[in-house]
């Protein structure tokens, strides 16, 4: 659309939102003028006043339908509908305060839980590790054949110290070692 068109339509649409009663009054007046002109034209054709009025109303298709068409051409109807729905929702929630409080609490819990889960996932999975060149980090795990269960990525103290002594591939090593006789839930020692 042309720029001049927007300079005309935007103020008109804003005016129809802000000064709704005045716009409705102007619309009523304009439709009344059109109706009177149509009646005068039919009277000039020789019809009676009642016939002329009926024919003019019939040709116009009803004043309320015309008003609705004019309101729709302003293209702010959806804003008016949204405001009307919001007022209805506020009135409905005001009638049932217990439901309103429960709905607000459930929404707050849901939003809080989603925020917490996203924060954890973002920190653990999505964001890069807080190390220089995190793509160069490796996880090394050692599990003796004698273990029947898998304790997860781990290494006992002796194995780590021997691995660190014979390391020729890595720049530096760090671990949270499992002591011999490790029990799940016991505290780990970290060595650099």
Image (cartoon, rainbow, N blue to C red):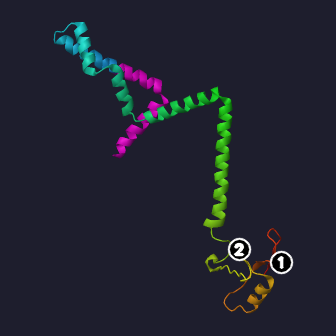
Q: Please name the residue shown 61% across and 77% down the image.
A: 135
Would residue 68 be seen by someone viewing this image from the given angle? yes
- What separation in Å lies between label 2 and label 1 (alpha carbons)? 15 Å
Question: Residues in magenta?
Answer: 1-30
Which residue is disc 1 drawn over? 181
The image quadrant that residue 116 belongs to is bottom right
Examine the image and state in which quarter residue 11 appears. top left
Considering only vertical position in the picture, is 88 above or below 162?
Answer: above
Classify mark 1: residues with Cα within 10 Å, few (<14), some (14-19) or many (20+).
few
Q: Main secondary structure of the magenta part?
A: helix
Q: Position of residue 137 (x, y in %)?
A: 65, 79
Residue positioned most to the left: 45
Tell me if residue 37 can be seen.
Answer: no
Q: Position of residue 130 (x, y in %)?
A: 68, 71
Whether the magenta-drawn stretch holds residue 13 is answered as yes
When asked about the image quadrant of residue 118, the answer is bottom right
Compared across the picture, whether 82 is left or right of 2 comes to right
- Is residue 97 depicted above or below 109 in this figure? above
In this figure, which residue is indicated by the disc labeled 2? 152
Task: Specify whether 17 is left or right of 35.
Answer: right
Q: Secondary structure at mark 1?
A: loop
Marks 2 and 1, the one that precedes in the sequence? 2
Which residue is painted at 59% across and 27% down in the image? Answer: 91
| Position in image of residue 114 (x %, y %) | 64, 52
Asked if residue 17 is among those painted magenta in the image, a careful observer would answer yes
User: Along the horizontal axis of the image, is 141 left or right of 135?
Assistant: right
Can you tell which of label 2 and label 1 is closer to the viewer? 1
**Along the viewing direction, whichever of 91 and 50 lies nearer the viewer:** 91
């Amino acid at each position: 659309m042309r720029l001049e068109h927007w300079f005309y339509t935007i103020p008109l649409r804003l005016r129809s939102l802000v000064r709704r009663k005045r716009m409705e009054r102007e619309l009523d007046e304009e439709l009344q003028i059109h109706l009177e002109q149509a009646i005068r034209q039919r009277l000039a054709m020789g019809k009676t006043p009642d016939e002329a009025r009926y024919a003019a109303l019939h040709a116009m298709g009803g004043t309320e339908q015309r008003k609705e068409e004019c309101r729709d051409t302003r293209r702010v109807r959806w804003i008016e509908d949204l405001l009307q729905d919001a007022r209805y929702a506020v009135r409905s929630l005001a009638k049932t305060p217990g439901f309103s409080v429960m709905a607000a609490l459930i929404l707050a819990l849901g939003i809080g839980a989603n925020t917490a889960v996203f924060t954890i996932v973002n920190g653990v999975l999505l964001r890069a590790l807080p190390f220089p060149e995190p793509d160069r980090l490796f996880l090394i795990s050692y599990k003796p054949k004698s273990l029947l269960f898998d304790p997860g990525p781990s290494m006992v103290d002796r194995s780590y110290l021997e691995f660190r002594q014979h390391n020729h591939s890595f720049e530096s090593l760090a671990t949270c070692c499992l002591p011999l006789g490790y029990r799940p839930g016991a505290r780990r020692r970290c060595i650099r």
